Amino acid sequence: MRKGRSWLAGLLLVFFFFSQVFSTGCGKKDTKVLRIRVGFFPNVTHSVPIVGLEKGIFQKHLGKEAVVETRIFTAGPALMEALNAGEVDIGYVGPVPVVNSYAQGSDVKVVAGACNGGSLLVYRLGSGIRQVRDLAGKRVGVPQLANTQDLLLRHVLEEAGLKDSNRGGTVQIVQVTPADLYPLFRRGEVDAALVAEPWGSWLKEKGIAGILLDWKSIWAEGRYPTTVVAVRGDFYRQNSSLVDRWLAGHRETVEFITASREEAGDILVQALKRLTGQEMDKKTILNTLQTCQPVWEVKEEFIEAFARLAYRNGYLRGMPDLQGLLAKR
């Protein structure tokens, strides 16, 4: 009886051993799936990550080795804080927050451009504003202080001989989430705003705003970068091949948007409604795609120009050495 029990116990042990071997794929190595955390804004200036993710272009290039998690922001300084805290790996963000962060010691690399142009300076109808000099004594909104639209506004004011009220001038610059501009314009609490598209065109479509400066008139005939691709330094060094695959998806998405604006417009209308709760007319979105040029290159001269603007406006203590910011790929 005892021998029978011992024999049965041995048989069960052998069965358990082989069941474990076969359950792990007969000795195959476990494949680790990497999580890539990507941050971007619900703007047409961020059409590349929105469209590329919606169409599965990025996932196609990443394959089964990585899964993408997304996080939505409304302004660049907040995204850079998350990237520096290790909460975001790849960020689509304006060049100014990247430059400011890098100058303060952030370990970050700019690996590509994403959008040129795509910003509008709009004014509230009934505000009495007809030209830039009329912004004197007015409240002007930007998504966040020290972001790209803020620096573009300060450039425009400087050209017109105006200053921020905090720097001895009369223009009061206020932080406003773009989706909140509509009620603020209606109540007369904000007189103008410099925002990324589609928010300027959306306010005009709503019949409460006019365009004071279009995307080409703000600076450099619209060739300035509004969005770049920033990668956290340690993620860039540890996952170089994965970053390359992400950029291959980025480039394919740029080419798709350029060649298929109608389909890209449909994708953006649905995605922006889901992300912001605001429904926008497809015609408006298609018009903004004409002002937001999707790109994969970034010109160093404009990054340096933004750094000079940041320095002149007190966001930097000195001109930073930007030699290590742009990745040489």
Image (cartoon, grey):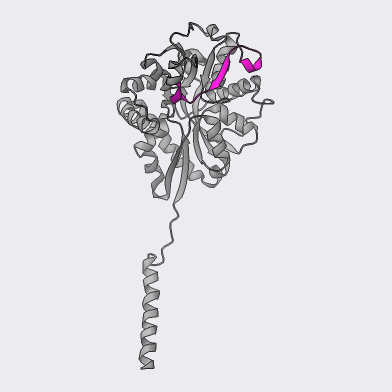
Let me know if residue 186 is in the magenta part.
Answer: no
Q: Position of residue 231 (x, y in %)?
A: 53, 38
Let me know if residue 170 is in the magenta part.
Answer: yes
Q: Residue furthest bottom?
A: 1
Q: Position of residue 265 (x, y in %)?
A: 33, 26
Residue occupying the point 36% across, 16% down = 205
Of residues 103 and 274, the one nearer the viewer is 274
Report whether 302 appears left or right of 179.
right
Residue 247 can be seen in this image: yes
Residue 118 can be seen in this image: no
Q: Is residue 329 above or below residue 280?
A: below
Residue occupying the point 48% across, 21% down = 195
Of residues 174 and 61, the one nearer the viewer is 174
Residue occupying the point 39% across, 47% down = 63
Q: Position of residue 272 (x, y in %)?
A: 37, 30
Q: Is residue 21 above or below residue 273?
A: below
Q: Which residues are magenta?
A: 163-181
Residue occupying the point 45% across, 12% down = 124
